[in-house]
Each structure stands twice: as C-alpha cells, then as structure tokens.
Image: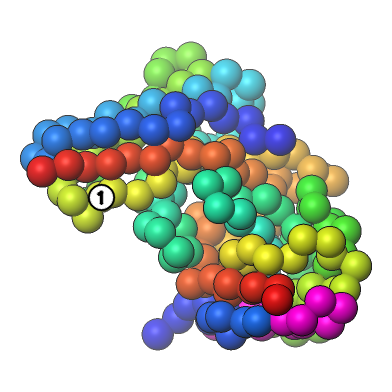
C-alpha cells in the first residue's frame, strides 16, 4: 500500500545528542514537509522540500537539519543546538508542490529528551 | 502565520450535526480551503477541500460563503469517533510556492 512511513515511533535522547528521524514515502510525491507539534498546539513548519536536492527553512528551522537526496526520503536531524526538542514530529508529502494537493501524513515520531 | 481563524473548542451531541466554522478573510482567488482532522497522537487525516462551490464526500460537507472569506465543515451525524482536532488551512505564499500552514484548530468533543 502507498503511504508515508515514519520511524521510530518513539525515541528517547540524552541532552547533547543528535538524533535522526526517518520519513519515507512511496507515493511518488515531489513535495515533503516536516512539522513539529507541542502539547495543545497546532503544527509548526520546520523544513520543506519541493523537489529532490532542494529544501527550504520553515518557521522554526533553528536546531534542525534535513536532506533530500532521494525523492522518497526526507530525514530530519534534531541537533544538540535545538534547545527544547521534546515534541511530536510529523512528516507529510503532497503531489503538487507549488499549487496544491492534499497532504498525506505519517503517524508521527515522539521524541523525548531525558 | 496561519491565515485562518477557528474557535478553540466545540462540543456536539452524538447523532447531531457538528458545524465547524473557519474564517479565512485574506484568502486569494485561486487558493483552496482544506480541512484535516487529528485524533490524539496520530497524523492528521485529510477530510475535504473546496475552492468556491460547496463540496460533499463520504466524510463531510464543506460550505464556502460566496465571498470565500469563511467556510463551515459539517459532520452530518457526529459519532464519538469524530472527537478530534479539526484544522482548516489555506496555503501561505512562500518563496514562489504555496505552503500549507496550520493554526491551532478546533477541538471537537462529541458526547453521548
């Protein structure tokens, strides 16, 4: 079945460690997005990519990094520079990067910093 | 910043219609309005979208005002499983593209 797969579902990290969250899609979508969600809050955009080998900062990119070497993959690295990384992270993709198209979401990754 | 405004919470009796409003007064002529819902600790799920005409699918109906400055998502017969956060979104112009931007949504509680 087509869809978006995020892993791991739960992740614990010690302060000062970098962690990478995986996002893979087999929908052949050009655009991919990373959002962060804190308790009781909406989704905030971290990074987005409209095409392979290109990505742009969102509203809260500081302390995060991404890559888009393959169309189907858009991993997010949470670096030690991110001051408050404990959150729920959601990856999404859409077929029409410039103009529209519905978003398809993964099931999310919950990161907890100990 | 989100370009939509929604009430933070609403409640509805099971079996009744749930009417969820959204204000998008700065929407441009070619922007669609999309609705998603998020059940706790899951990824948001697409519900419906529209441009200017009213739309209906198996999940819901979408009513868009003639001036396109607001819309209402209608769940005709709400069930307990419709309890979720509902997001109304439009895309925000950013660097030549249009990026989906979420606000805080409306937390809908359906009670017995």
What kind of element bears circle 1? helix
* Vertical position of residue A74 compared to residue B45: above or below: below
In the picture provided, is B7 more to the left or to the right than A8? left
10 Å crowding of disc 1: few (<14), some (14-19), many (20+): many
> Which residue is farthest front?
A114
- Picture residue at 79% right of the left edge, 48% below the top: A59
Numbered circles on residues, count: 1
Identify the coloring: rainbow
Residue B27 placement: quadrant: top right
The residue lying toward the viewer, choosing from B93 and A7, is: A7
Q: Which chain is home to disc 1?
A: B
> Quadrant of the rendered structure where residue A86 is?
bottom right
Q: Is residue A46 above or below residue A68?
A: above
Residue drawn at point x = 84 percent, y = 65 percent: A82
The residue positioned 70% from the left and 45% from the top of the image is B98
The spot of residue B26 in percent (x, y) is: 63, 21
Q: Nearer the viewer, residue B46 or A114?
A: A114
Q: Position of residue B72 (x, y in %)?
A: 36, 28
The percent position of residue B30, horizontal first and vertical second, equals: 60, 32
- Judge whether residue A99 can be spotted in this image: no
Which quadrant of the rendered structure holds the C terminus of chain B?
top left
Taking the magenta stretch, the answer to whether it contains residue A96 is no
**Placement of the N terminus of chain B among the 4 image quadrants:** top right
Residue under numbered circle 1: B82
The magenta segment is A13-26
Residue A42 x/y as whole percent: 57, 46
Q: Is residue A18 left or right of residue A96?
A: right
The extreme top residue here reads: B67
For image coordinates 42% across by 54% down, the residue present is B38
Q: Is residue A22 magenta?
A: yes
- Please identify the quarter of the rendering in which residue A71 is found: bottom right
């Amino acid at each position: 079945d087509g869809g978006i797969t995020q892993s791991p579902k739960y992740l614990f990290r010690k302060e000062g460690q970098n962690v990478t969250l995986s996002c893979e899609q087999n929908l052949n979508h050009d655009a991919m997005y990373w959002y962060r969600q804190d308790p009781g809050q909406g989704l905030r955009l971290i990074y987005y990519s409209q095409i392979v080998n290109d990505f742009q900062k969102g509203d809260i990119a500081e302390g995060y990094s991404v890559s888009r070497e393959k169309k189907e993959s858009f991993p997010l690295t949470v670096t030690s520079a991110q001051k408050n990384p404990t959150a729920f992270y959601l990856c999404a993709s859409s077929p029409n990067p410039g103009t529209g198209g519905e978003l398809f979401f993964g099931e999310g990754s919950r990161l907890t910093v100990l | 910043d989100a370009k939509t405004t929604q009430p933070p919470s609403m409640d509805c009796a099971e079996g009744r219609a749930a009417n969820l409003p959204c204000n998008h007064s700065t929407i441009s002529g070619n922007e669609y309005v999309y609705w998603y819902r998020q059940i706790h600790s899951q990824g948001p799920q697409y519900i419906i979208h529209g441009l200017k005409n009213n739309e209906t699918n198996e999940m819901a109906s979408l009513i868009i005002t003639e001036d396109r400055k607001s819309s209402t998502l209608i769940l005709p017969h709400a069930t307990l499983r419709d309890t979720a956060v509902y997001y109304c979104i439009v895309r925000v112009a950013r660097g030549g593209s249009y990026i989906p931007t979420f606000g805080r949504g409306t937390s809908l509680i359906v009670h017995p």
